[in-house]
Amino acid sequence: MLLRARVVELEELVARDHAELERAIEAMSRWAPTADQRVTLDAARLGFAAHAEAEANILQRALVIAPPMHVAARLLERMLGAHATQEALLWRLARSVPNTVEWVDALSALRASFVDHVVDERLGLLPIVRELLAADAYQLLATSYATERLRALAMMSAVVARTRARRRTAHP
């Protein structure tokens, strides 16, 4: 019996990342202050950064075939802008105390930005990219996305490990 590997679509990989961030937003929204909120925030920031970098890298490369004024190019710019906003809001959360007004405001703004971003990608950018590219080229985007995301996570993990090592040697 020959088993056939299931093909994972780009939309599915991106949706998984979005679901992960959505779960993190919900966990950080709980009013009982816990250390888990900080751990969740750290994990969300790391996962988001890897997602944003991978998505930007593969979609920018894929859309070089689109004319500058094509709707896909405009949607890509909108996606990059949403990622910048979300990164700034995650940074703001990292510098605020959980369950304060600043925390709740930043979390609410992150949730709103995230909801708009997910709709833009799911109903706009990704279907247009699928239409623009040949089927085999589009399928390669999923592989490229997964590879880019893992590369970004590995690179960030190495930076975190070096920073922790320096802190330990500076404060024995």
Image (spheres, helix red, strand yellow):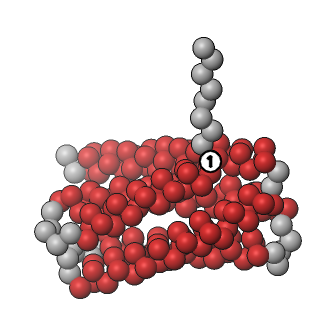
What is the quadrant of residue 52 in the picture? bottom right
Residue 95 visible in the picture? yes
19 vs 142: above or below: below
Measuring 21% from the left and 69% from the top, which residue is drawn there? 30
Question: What percent of the width, then of the height, locates residue 131?
Answer: 78, 60
Question: What percent of the width, then of the height, locates residue 109?
Answer: 40, 81
122 vs 163: above or below: below
Measuring 30% from the left and 66% from the top, which residue is drawn there? 26
According to the picture, the residue beneath numbered tag 1 turns out to be 9
Measuring 43% from the left and 79% from the top, which residue is drawn there? 112
Q: Nearer the viewer, residue 148 or 161?
A: 148
**Left or right of residue 105: residue 59:** right
Residue 155 visible in the picture? no
**Left or right of residue 50: residue 97:** left
Disc 1 packing (10 Å; few <14; some 14–19; many ≥20): some
Question: What percent of the width, then of the height, locates residue 19?
Answer: 43, 58
Question: What percent of the width, then of the height, locates residue 139?
Answer: 71, 45
Mark 1 residue type: Glu
87 vs 133: above or below: below
Q: Nearer the viewer, residue 139 or 59?
A: 139
What is the quadrant of residue 61 in the picture? bottom right
